[in-house]
Image (tube, rainbow, N blue to C red):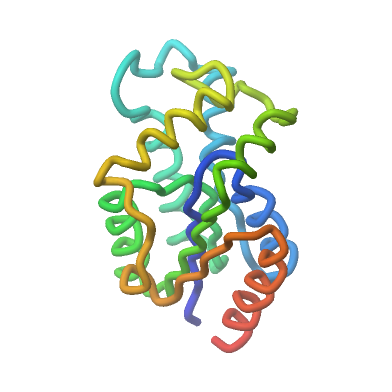
Amino acid sequence: MTRIVVITVGKTHSGKTTFARALEQKMHNSLVIDQDNHAEFINTHYRSLQPKQGPNTIKYVITQTIVDYAVHQTDFHLILCNSNRVREGRVNLLAYFRDKGFRTILVNFDLSDHVLEERVAISQRSTNVFRSASTFEEVLIRQQTDSHNLDEVAPSAVEADQLFVIQQSDEVHDVIQKIVNISRSL
């Protein structure tokens, strides 16, 4: 059986988690793996193990362990709900899944900064996922600045087997249905 991995790409509050949960409900035999859950777990129980600077390696190790387990011990389609904005990391992640026989799908959330700023302003989400920021506004400002960094390149169609780009919230339902149809055709 061929499995699918759906990898989300986008800035904070672009709809990645909402999309992933909705897709999980519609796509039979699927599982969401969300790094925000791992970050919150670490911040709640193991804050002292976090690196003071640089990459949050403990979060990445926990995520990779869960991914490896899901790949090798289950038959689930996987939905990775992370920002995946740095091209090199995204390409390496896609290669890992291709090597394991997965069909790869990227969903790029490319909503306008104006929409994201409005969403952040009214957000009720827990900030217990943060290591170095204190508000989602701070995260968004950093991501807007980082978007000019050459490492943060929007996904291209050659990176994955399938690429979907969501620029408006009303496109989400159609993309979910297309991915569900792909999963049914395997």
Question: Please, which residue is most extreme toward the top here?
Answer: 48
Provide residue 56's location: percent of width, then percent of height: 37, 28
59 sits to left or right of 129: left
Which is nearer the eye, 44 or 129? 129
Answer with left or right where residue 161 lies relative to residue 127: left
Q: Position of residue 71 (x, y in %)?
A: 45, 61
42 to 23, vertically: above or below: above
Residue 150 sits above or below residue 106 on the image:
above
The answer to whether residue 2 is left or right of residue 93 is right
Toward the bottom, the furthest residue is 185
Residue 164 image offset from top left, x and y in percent: 51, 69
Which residue is located at x 65 percent, y 60 percent? 168
Q: Is residue 71 left or right of 174 when viewed as pictured? A: left
Could you tell me residue 41's position as x and y percent? 57, 27
Instruction: For the C terminus, give its image quadrant.
Output: bottom right
Q: Residue 182, located in which quarter of the rendered image?
A: bottom right
Look at 68% across and 73% down and name the residue there. 174
Residue at 51% of width from left, 23% of height from top? 138
